[in-house]
Amino acid sequence: MPHQMLIARLRSVTGLSEQDQAKLESMPHTIKRFAPGECLARQGDRPVSCAVVMGGFLSRQRVASDRIQITSFYIPGDIPDLHTLHFPEMDRDLRSIGTSIIALVPHSYLREILAKSAALAHAFWPETLIHTAIYREWIENLGSREALPRLAHLLCEIAARLELVGLLNNGRFHVPFTQQDIADACGLSTVHANRTIQELRRRKLIEWNGHAVDLIQRDRLELLADFRPSYLMR
Amino acid sequence: MPHQMLIARLRSVTGLSEQDQAKLESMPHTIKRFAPGECLARQGDRPVSCAVVMGGFLSRQRVASDRIQITSFYIPGDIPDLHTLHFPEMDRDLRSIGTSIIALVPHSYLREILAKSAALAHAFWPETLIHTAIYREWIENLGSREALPRLAHLLCEIAARLELVGLLNNGRFHVPFTQQDIADACGLSTVHANRTIQELRRRKLIEWNGHAVDLIQRDRLELLADFRPSYLMR
DNA sequence: CGCGCAGTTGATCACAATCAATTAACGTGG
DNA sequence: CCACGTTAATTGATTGTGATCAACTGCGCG
């Protein structure tokens, strides 16, 4: 059984029969480990299975001439390529940030159980809708906030998402990100991302040593970022 | 029967029974007209029906203190609030740009037919996935392109989407947008959006008089914008 | 021990925001 | 039919955020 939080989310949808629930529990899958920077899939690939993040972080990204733009991060419990069930081709690279543990579930199995049960289709659909809502927030973040609140918003979002899968400890969490990754997600240069992080530190809103981030004044950080987490829940 | 292109898209999904197809054709709906600037739904609303755009344009947007950020445009054939079937609350305002004609289809009906047929669920799911792909492109657009290619990309996207529903005439199309709307979508000031449009005109890539836009050198515009339309198709 | 990468810092430059006017287009009412 | 108000588009001047270029530091690792 892939990630338990994912299973719990899927099961929480009403209308699932005992059978459906059993199909979720007994989902066939193979576990695979990916090295830092390794690509699970590249733009143009047509994966034959969906990836469930069990541990670690992934990014969806594209190399645009000189810059890299990251369009999303994926954390444990996410299925970054669920849409390939309908649109087989990956539009962007899917890369492991740091080491990650991935459960691969064959398309064939998912297609089969989804075709047989409308309730299961209703359970999986929201998994893509959540990320749609996140994309909308990113558009707002990139289009309307300047560097400081923009970076703050990203941190708040990651913390909130980690919290939902139990990976946040009192405002503290671990990320494999480099400042380059943060810059690529926020559409900033590394230099400016660095300065912005320093400004957050200077204001005593966060601590960030190595791969450990601590939101020491989470409420004030969320205020600065104009962050409201409701979009992450259903 | 709401928008014919939408119906055609939905019907093109394999595995639909005669019954399913009939349910699509005979979808109950009421037609409503919205005035320029009027809101179909506001942030926090819980609509009881889904809106199918029959004519005109909508924007999803949010007033952020001083600025407005538009996160998406909707054109005929789109269902901007299909996700409210799963997440009942609107996260942003849905506004009519110019006058628009909307078909409202009750949630209750959609829920009923989707609950009974897994195939229908598979037909509607991609309607949200297309917009997810569009969001990803917007993130890249806002995060990694500067004003000129950014605005060009938006124009290319709108043209390509209109083309898919037969509303593009030899590179020419009609939009009710003001330059303010374009600016709000691109994360630019009106002044700079204006200058950027003028630069596109100066380079003889577009003509834009009143509400009529003409991509007189579409290929060169797409080159400038680094636009590839594959993300709009399935 | 040295190489390389991540992070930090400083100096300079450019794109785009802001502020401030001006012009054009369009309705409406006198 | 013209005066007026309103909204959209245009232009110029100035300011500032964030990019770029260029060292330099500290640390982990082979």
Image (cartoon, coloured by chain):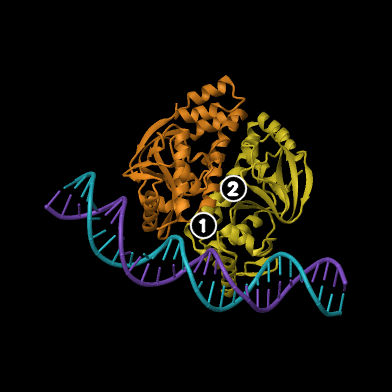
Chain colours: A orange, B yellow, C purple, D cyan
Percent from the top left, x then y, of residue B94?
A: 67, 49
Viewer-proximal residue among B186 and B12 = B186
- Residue placed at 38% from the left, 41% from the top? A214
Q: Is residue A81 above or below residue D2?
A: above
- Tell me if A102 is positioned left or right of B126 in this view: left
- Residue placed at 52% from the left, 32% from the top? A110
Percent from the top left, x then y, of residue A126?
A: 57, 36
- Residue placed at 54% from the left, 26% from the top? A11
Percent from the top left, x then y, of residue B13?
A: 63, 40
Confirm whether residue B13 shows in the render. Answer: no
Q: Is residue B28 above or below residue A195?
A: above
Q: Circle 2 is placed at which residue position?
A: B131
Placement of the N terminus of chain B among the 4 image quadrants: top right
Residue B85 is labelled as none
Q: Amino acid at mark 2?
A: His
- Tell me if B19 is positioned left or right of B153 in this view: right
Furthest toward the top, the residue is A18
> Who comes first in sequence, dot 2 or dot 1?
2
Percent from the top left, x then y, of residue B6?
A: 69, 46
Q: Are marks 2 and 1 in contact (CB under 8 Å)?
A: no
Q: Looking at the rendering, which quadrant does residue A162 occupy?
A: top left
Confirm whether residue B122 shows in the render. Answer: yes
The secondary element bearing badge 1 is classed as: helix
Residue B142 is labelled as 1
Q: What is the spatial separation of the Cα atoms under label 2 and label 1, in whole angstroms?
A: 16 Å
The secondary element bearing badge 2 is classed as: helix
